Amino acid sequence: MQPIYEGKSKRLFATENPDELIMQFKDDATAFNAEKHAVFADKGRLNCAISNLIYGMLAKEGIPTHFVRLLDDTRVVVKKVDILMVEVIVRNVAAGSYCKRTGVAEGTAFGAPVLEFSLKSDALGDPLINDDYIRELALATPEELAFLRRSALKVNELLSAFFLKAGLRLVDFKLEFGRLATDPATIVLADEISPDGCRLWDVTTGEKMDKDRFRRDLGNFMESYAEVLKRAQHALEN
Ligand code: TMP
Ligand code: ASP
């Protein structure tokens, strides 16, 4: 079957239900706008498992998501959405592009979460944008933008507490949202939540347990993802 959409780490397939899609996690890893690319056996399964576990936790806490049901190790059925072309990034600790942009040392904790938006465009390299850009580009209405902010901060609270139970510090993460095909007035959390789009540091050793291992060639890339999954499963049960 041909995908209706193929991204860097996932494929989307149509289903008999026009309001639902199948999302398949691939084994591909990319970084720096796909300048760097490699395939890692089992990555799709690990990210699918981690993402589903987190989506389940968030749904239980009242966060509306695109998740419908698990199909198998690498595929989930999701509600069809129109993805908002704005990526929402939340930071608790300085890292990555924040450090590059400001010169602040990696690991500097923030007094309060730093919320940031970027334009979802690989061609443009996902540039940083602000509220006024979002208005002029008609990416979201002021009400939708307020909802994105509130949701992202709420997700940050829930995710930070959850990962802490797993012995992981949630440094930063990226969220994507979509308008439901069946009801465009309703926005839900979409895409994946995995170590591809989060920075996670071991609480005691500070060791990086996320895609920075690939970006920076730190080794033990999939071993770290497997460890994140193991710890997240344990945190869920306790
Ligand atoms: P950054 O420090 O490179 O801006 O990344 C912040 C967080 O957002 C980090 O956890 C990785 C995630 N992210 C993505 O998931 N996709 C992207 O395209 C980018 C640039 C960042
Ligand atoms: N997700 C982007 C890419 O795959 C950037 C990154 O995560 O470093 O190129």
Image: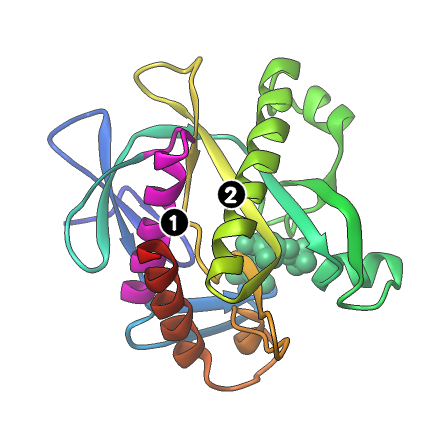
Q: Secondary structure at mark 1?
A: helix
Nearer-the-camera pick, 134 or 218: 218
Which residue is farthest front? 238
Q: From the viewer's perspective, is the residue at label 1 or at label 2 nearer?
A: 2
- Identify the main secondary structure in magenta: helix
Q: Is residue 86 visible?
A: no
Q: Position of residue 150 (x, y in %)?
A: 61, 27
Examine the structure image and report whether residue 225 is included in the region drawn in magenta.
no
Cβ atoms at labels 1 and 2 below 8 Å apart:
no
Q: Earlier in the sequence, mark 1 or mark 2?
A: 1
Q: Which residues are magenta?
A: 44-66
Amino acid tagged 2 = Leu
Which label is found at residue 158? Answer: 2
Q: Is residue 134 above or below residue 13?
A: above
Q: Position of residue 195 (x, y in %)?
A: 48, 62
Q: Quadrant of residue 45?
A: bottom left
The residue identified by callout 1 is 54
